[in-house]
Amino acid sequence: MSHSDAELVETNATPASEIAGQGSGAEWLSRYSSSLMGVFGTPQRVLVRGAGCLVWDADGKEYLDLLGGIAVNAMGHAHPFVTSVIASQLATLGHVSNFFTSPTQIALAEKLLALVKAPAGSKVFFANSGTEANEAAFKLARRNSDGKRSKIIALEGAFHGRTMGALALTAKEAYRTPFEPLPGGVVHIPFGDIEALRAAVDDTTAAVFLEPIQGEAGVRPLSTEYLQAAREATTAAGALLILDEVQTGIGRTGKWLASEDAGIVPDAITLAKGLGGGFPVGALITFGEATSSLLSAGQHGTTFGGNPVATAAALATLHAIESQGVLENARTVGAFLRKGLADVDGVTEVRGVGLLIGFDLDADVAPAVVQAGLDAGFIVNSPGPRTIRLAPPLILSTEQAGRFLAALPALLQTAKESQ
Ligand SMILES: *Cc1c(COP(=O)(O)O)cnc(C)c1O
C-alpha cells in the first residue's frame, strides 16, 4: 500500500504545542526520570516555549534567560529571521551527505574565514558540536608530527568536551578518571603561568590547546601577554597553537573572537555554541595552507556535519548578529552588568568580557542562588560552589540586565537563609 504525500503529512503530524500540553512540570519530570539517562541529574525545569530572552516552563511560569542555553542562543529564542531561514532550507533541501556539497555550506565556510580574518590557504571543517570540533582539532594536532611530537599541552581548569579525545584535553578529574585510559600524550600545565608554558613547550610538542577565557572553570580570562607568549613559544618549537573558542567565539565577548585583541594568528580555532544560534553546528578552522593540509582526504569525516540546514542556520545567525548591532550590544550590556554586579553586596569579584560573565560570592551559596533565581524567574548557572556564570542571548537589553541586578541582593539573601 502506498501513501500519498498528503496522507504522510497528516499521519505524521504531532505539533509541538500538542505534546507540550500533555502535562505539568512535575508529570514531565517523572516521565523524564523513567526514560532519560541520568547523566544530567534532575533537570531544573521543563521548558516549552521561548521568545527573545524569555522562556516559559510547562506550568506557564516565565523566566529571563541569562544563560542562553550555555552561550548558545546568541540571537535569543525563536528568532523570526533565523527560524524562517531554517524552515525554508529544510523545506528545500535538508540533508545530502558529504559525498555532496551545498551552497550554504560553501557560503558559511567563506563567511567564517572572512570573519576570523584567516590568511590564504585557511580551511573549514564542519561538525555538529564543540566536542566534535575539538576531536577534529586533536586529530589535526596528531598529524603535526614527524613521529616525535607526542606531547599535547592543555591547561589546568580546561574544558574541551566529553568525547574521548576532547576529554583527554579536559582537566577535571571527575570527568576523566572513570573513562581512562584516554588518548595519551596530553599534559596539563598551571593556568596563566607563562614560565610554566615556556618550560613545557618543546620540540616534542604537537600542539597547545587554549580557551582564551575558560568558561566552565568559572569565566577565567587568559591575559593578552599569555596568548602572545603561547604564540611565540609554539612558533619557536614548531607546535600548533589551537584556540578553543567554542564558548567565547561568535560575538560572545562583543567581538567575533575573544582572541582578536591579542593580535596573534593561531594555527586553528574551534567554534560551536553560538554559531548556529541554537541549531547544532561546530567548526574547526585551520589557518594557512600548511596547517590545513595536515588532515588529508579520508582522514576525518562526519555524516551530519555541515549539512544544508545547519549551515543555513549558522549563516542566518551570523547575518542577524552583523545586521542588528549585536556585537555592540554585547559590549554595552556586558559592561553595564559587570559594573552593576561589582556594586552588589556579597559579590567579591566580577570577571569576563562582553556577555560572558562570571562573578564570585562571599559564601558557598552559588547553587542556592541558581535555585532562588529560578523561583524568582531568572535562569543563571553556577560553575562552582561560589561562582555564578551569565551567558545570556547577545540581544539582552539594558532593561532586562537591570531587572536581574535589582533582584540579585534578594536572591543572595534567600540563598544564604536556605543554607
Ligand atoms: C561547551 C564547550 C565545549 C564542548 O561543546 P559541546 O557542544 O558540548 O560538545 C568545548 N569547549 C568549550 C570551551 C566549551 O565551552
Image: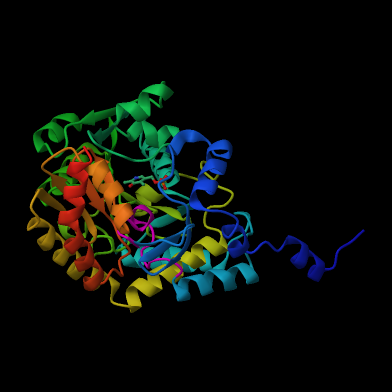
Q: Which residues are magenta?
A: 64-78
Which residue does the image show at 21% across and 45% down from the upper left?
Answer: 415
Tell which residue pokes out farthest to the front in this image. 417
Tell which residue pokes out farthest to the right in this image. 1
Which residue does the image show at 17% across and 42% down from the upper left?
Answer: 416
> In the displayed structure, would residue 136 be above or below residue 273?
above
Q: Which one is in front, 107 or 76?
A: 76
Residue 67 part of the magenta-drawn span: yes
Point out residue 142 in the picture as x, y percentages from the top left corner.
Answer: 39, 35
Point out residue 345 in the picture as x, y percentages from the top left corner.
Answer: 7, 52
Which residue does the image show at 15% across and 35% down from the upper left?
Answer: 197
Q: How is the image coloured?
A: rainbow
Which residue does the image show at 27% across and 59% down from the upper left?
Answer: 257
In the shown orientation, is residue 99 left or right of residue 296?
Answer: right
Q: Which one is in front, 98 or 133?
A: 133
Point out residue 297 in the picture as x, y percentages from the top left corner.
Answer: 53, 46
Tell which residue pokes out farthest to the bottom in this image. 323
Residue 27 part of the magenta-drawn span: no
> In the displayed structure, would residue 343 be above or below residue 76?
above
> In the displayed structure, would residue 125 be above or below residue 386?
below
The reply to whether residue 103 is in sight is: yes
The image shows a total of numbered marks equal to: 0
Point out residue 37 in the picture as x, y percentages from the top left corner.
Answer: 52, 35
Q: Which one is in front, 348 or 261?
A: 348
Q: Quadrant of residue 120?
A: bottom left
